[in-house]
Image (spheres, rainbow, N blue to C red):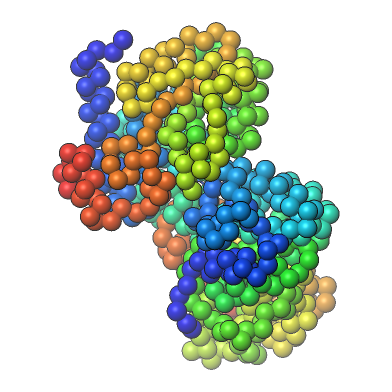
Amino acid sequence: MMTIERKDELQNLCLRFRNDLIDLLHSIQTGHPGGSLSCTEIVTTLFFEKMNIDPQNPSKEGRDRFIMSKGHACPMLYLNMAEKGYFPKEDLKSLRQIDSHLQGHPCAHKTIGVELSTGPLGMGLGAGLGMALGEKLKNSEASIYVLLGDGEIQEGGIWEAAMAASKYKANNLVAILDNNGVQLDGTLEEIMPMGSIGDKFAAFGWNVIRCDGHDVESFSNAVDEAKKSDDKPSIIIAKTIKGKGVSFMEGKNTWHGKPIDNNEYKQAKAELGGLV
Amino acid sequence: MGKEIAIRDAYGDALLNLGKKNDKVVVLESDVGSSSKSIVFGKEFPERYFNVGISEFNMVSMSTGFASEGFIPFVNTFAVFMTTRGADPIQSIIAYDSLNVKIAGTYAGLSDSYDGASHQSITDISFVRSIPNMTVISVSDAVETAKAVEAIADYNGPVYLRLSRAPAPTIFDDNYDFRIGKGVELKNGKDVAIIATGTILHNALKAAELLNEEGIEATVINIHTIKPIDEELIINAAKRTGAVVTVEEHSIYGGLGSAVAEVLSKKCPTPMEFVGATNFAESGDYNQLLEKYGYSPRSIAEKAKMVINKK
Ligand SMILES: Cc1ncc(C[n+]2csc(CCOP(=O)(O)OP(=O)(O)O)c2C)c(N)n1
Ligand SMILES: [Mg+2]
């Protein structure tokens, strides 16, 4: 159970991150707003409530791992990492600019604390499984969290990893599905309907948990439940809205990776209650 | 040079025109249709447009089935995903059986600049070029893009078509006689030959102007067909100038530079320099990346002077 005070705190943090995200992507005129806004509560709750990590000692043995397999949402990852203290907040404005350590997609050899380079979709689950099994060999208690897009799971490699995770009883592997129903060219329904994703993972031998991906408490409880799994990998199917928090972006594939113009910026900030 | 047109827009229009003329053309896409511009075809011909979601391996595999059914499939995604995820069916079915599939890899080179190295493509040419039966084409402007799309549809066999995200000034006009396998000499000079492919050809032309200011006369050649390569044109230029620089937004290992070196080392050994990638690049403004990674007209001109000194 999360106290009301703590829930408030996390929600306020999420609101601030949404504001900062819009500021940042407006200022650099590039980057992916839709999928960053949909995973705000997920990433923030992991970084500020759930994960055993230490920015002062980013490669500490036995730490929990976060893999942003849907790498294009990395602005939300970077906002969390800067707030946590992995790097100075001033660095954020260099996102996607030449000579920056903050690449357009997560880069493990440039940004200290990023656990895996991602961007090409569909590889994070397999990598996460390798980490999960490696931690087990080291008798570690760490959990490996892998954030997947719901379009991303159309990649065959995801299902290869799903089979293997089940075979190896990787109960320390927690996949999180940002289930916003939208991919790049349209909705999942239009482009590639996924049917019941929960049934599919269950058929692959996974522990399937559902939650409201914009409710920090609901998501936090889902993580607790996943950690109780004794012999199955878990997937948290987090119901989300692409572009959440900015009305004209919500549910729109066109806001997958579009620059924010000045008028849109003002409206977005007004809706988020932030200062322009 | 004419006005700037993005290669991907020219490609989308070319696909649409082709679709109108030839009902055997089908288009496959893997959720980047609004980027590759295959969507332009999809809007007009929804029944011949197959967006299979984020599943490149399946998309390329499916294209082989359409080809066996007598259709002319154009498959679309970013060059880097095409030649990594799609690599297996490209090599083991399309090329092996010489199927009539047109493989369009977009956002090639550094043109997807802000997305960073994971989305840029500097190894696609070397992969497709090394596969038997493949024809490899890389275009430099909107006119060439339109002509290439028509030409590869008329040609029966597997083709890799390399496309860019970048806007490029128009060099060619509608009278341009594009022929697969035939390079184009754009400037004839006696001191050095600059051989380029893709939109970076523009910087090669600018480099020639810089060299000209210093009294150096450069030949500039556009090699749009990297395989089969125009050996005769390359050998003649090497003989005339005695110094060759290749320019490509691609690794210098296995791309255009290697192809030219293979021809010259066998038939007309000539000093060479290579403009291209030796490392992964990064996120950033496209022109800043071109500057930093050695593709500016000035860098190309420097390489030209280096190779002249080796004569
Ligand atoms: C292998 C691969 N194919 C295509 C892309 C291009 N791409 C980037 S994001 C995206 C859509 C992702 O949709 P989804 O997974 O649902 O992410 P979200 O909605 O959370 O942004 C696509 C097709 C890619 N990055 N990698
Ligand atoms: Mg989605």
- Residue B184, by quadrant, is bottom right
Q: Quadrant of the N terminus of chain A?
A: top left
- Residue B73, by quadrant, is bottom right
Residue B116 in sight:
yes
- Please tell me which residue is depicted at 63% across the width and 75% down the height of the picture: B147
- Please tell me which residue is depicted at 71% across the width and 62% down the height of the picture: B24
The spot of residue A210 in percent (x, y) is 44, 19
In this rendering, would B180 be left or right of A213? right
- Please tell me which residue is depicted at 70% across the width and 68% down the height of the picture: B152
In this rendering, would A223 be left or right of B310? left
In depth, the one of A21 and A139 nearer the eye is A21
Residue B303 in sight:
no
In depth, the one of A209 and A30 nearer the eye is A209
The spot of residue B52 in percent (x, y) is 60, 45
The spot of residue B42 in percent (x, y) is 55, 57
In this rendering, would B278 be left or right of A28? right
Q: Is residue B223 above or below residue A123?
A: below
The spot of residue B173 in percent (x, y) is 56, 84
- Please tell me which residue is depicted at 33% across the width and 27% down the height of the picture: A214
Q: Is residue A54 above or below residue B258?
A: above
How many dots with numbers? 0
